[in-house]
Image (cartoon, grey):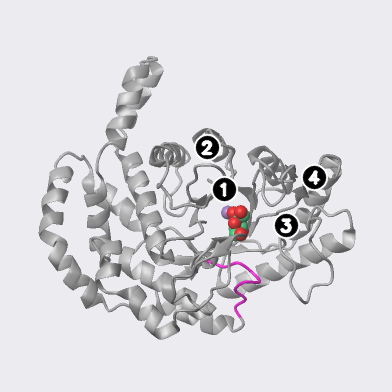
Amino acid sequence: MQLEKHLIDEHNHQLFKKHSRNFEHIAADIDGIDSLLNKLKAFNVAIPSWALGTGGTRFGRFSGGGEPRSLEEKLEDVGLIHALNKSSNSISLHIPWDIPDNAAAIKALAAQLGLHFDAVNSNTFQDQSAQQHSYKFGSLHHVDKAVRQQAVEHNLQVVKYGVELGSKALSVWLSDGSNFPGQLNFRGAFQNTLESLQQIYAGLPDDWKVWVEYKPYEPNFYSTTIGDWGQSYLLASKLGPKASTLVDLGHHLQGTNIEQIVSILLMEGKLAGFHFNDSKYGDDDLTVGSINPYQLFLIFNELVEGLDARGMNHATGIGWMIDASHNVKDPIEDLLQSVQAIKIAYAQALLVDKVALQAAQQSNDVALAQEVLQAAYRTDVRPLIAEASLANGGSLDPLATFRKLKVREQLIAQRGLKTVATGL
Ligand code: PSV
Ligand code: MN
């Protein structure tokens, strides 16, 4: 299913008067409004192929219906999201959940929808039916070389799929770890992981990157072999310039100062990009900005400052992606909300008065530094996001348009109520 542009335009028409009033109000106070709008117009966030169906926990999964039944239908869903918000022009595939059997046809469909392929993700955290060795006790860190070799070959196969589709990065997340003290020799596990990653690194095309994701726990509950940004950074440094650290917001223990981690990684040229989500307790995979939007803003404040300091392009300098699980919401609605939340945090960060903040920092004026940051955070930037979307041909209010046009109802009519997407 595809959305006809005139339907989006008609809904915009109904919303326009109110939008125009709100936009003029905020625009009057912003110096360089055109440059800010251009940055928002250029900004895109990739959609993971595994998050287009209903997620679940080990206790259950409650589908809302109309889930994509194939890779083609997943692309269609991302096409719908992009048509509405004009900020989701790429999809990130997880192999083997989404093997592109006919890469040329998949690429052509993506191009027709205005999409391209973001990083490809390998999966050595589950066993597949045809696989010789089990990943029960890990993959790239495994004590048995044959298991490690199998996992290395899988990663190289994922790169091959990615090359066919025009991806430029391999994203590696390992569930490798241990459940009990004594189960693992930490140094041995780390060295095995490094050697395995070195083999994968050696097989990367010249213009490719490898992104090393970390996570403190789950599915292993005592240790994870790439458990934090330090271990990821160490591996990425030993691997070389094509390797860097991927930050998934949910992969931190409670209270971790993620904005500081991001700032240092960016300074060192080792920040690959993001898996955005939000959480209250752990890797909760909730809608971005639903629990702690202030933290998201603080992260973006570091990003904007750090990207500018290195002269990097905000839109393309690092990878922007969502990684969430939609257990009770419509996945498309949830993804639309997440992309909006990311753009809101980005716009607020662009509004920070950097000169005033720096002056406050240099004079240790703590109260003023907080005032400067919060002045930006407390600005309602939604009219700016809406204006950028409108200028790109998208909806002034993507979620409202999705509902107004009864998109989910149409998807259920086409695909059925009891469909199941591959993924989380
Ligand atoms: C693991 O929790 C993770 O964040 C990794 O990015 C995986 O690739 C993804 O979720 C899907 O399982
Ligand atoms: Mn992730």
Q: Amino acid at mark 3?
A: Tyr
Structural distance between the alpha carbons of marks 3 and 2 = 27 Å
Q: Is residue 110 left or right of residue 385?
A: right
Disc with the residue nearer the chain's start (3 vs 2): 3
Numbered badge on residue 299: none
Q: Is residue 89 left or right of residue 176?
A: left
Label 4 element class: helix
Task: Residue 177 in the image: state x and y as whole percent.
Answer: 76, 48
Numbered badge on residue 190: 4
Disc with the residue nearer the chain's start (2 vs 4): 4
Q: Amino acid at mark 4?
A: Phe
Structural distance between the alpha carbons of marks 2 and 4 = 24 Å
Q: Amino acid at mark 2?
A: Ile
Structural distance between the alpha carbons of marks 3 and 1 = 28 Å
Disc 3 C-beta below 8 A from ligand 1: no
Q: Amino acid at mark 1?
A: Asp
Disc with the residue nearer the chain's start (1 vs 2): 2
Structural distance between the alpha carbons of marks 1 and 2 = 14 Å
Label 2 element class: helix
- Dominant SS type (magenta): loop
Quarter of the figure that contains the C terminus: bottom right
Structural distance between the alpha carbons of marks 4 and 1 = 23 Å
Q: Which residue is mark 2?
A: 258
Disc with the residue nearer the chain's start (3 vs 1): 3
Circles 3, 4 touching at the beta carbon (< 8 Å): no
Task: Residue 59 in the image: state x and y as whole percent.
Answer: 59, 60
In magenta, the rendered stretch is 92-100
The magenta stretch spans residue 94: yes
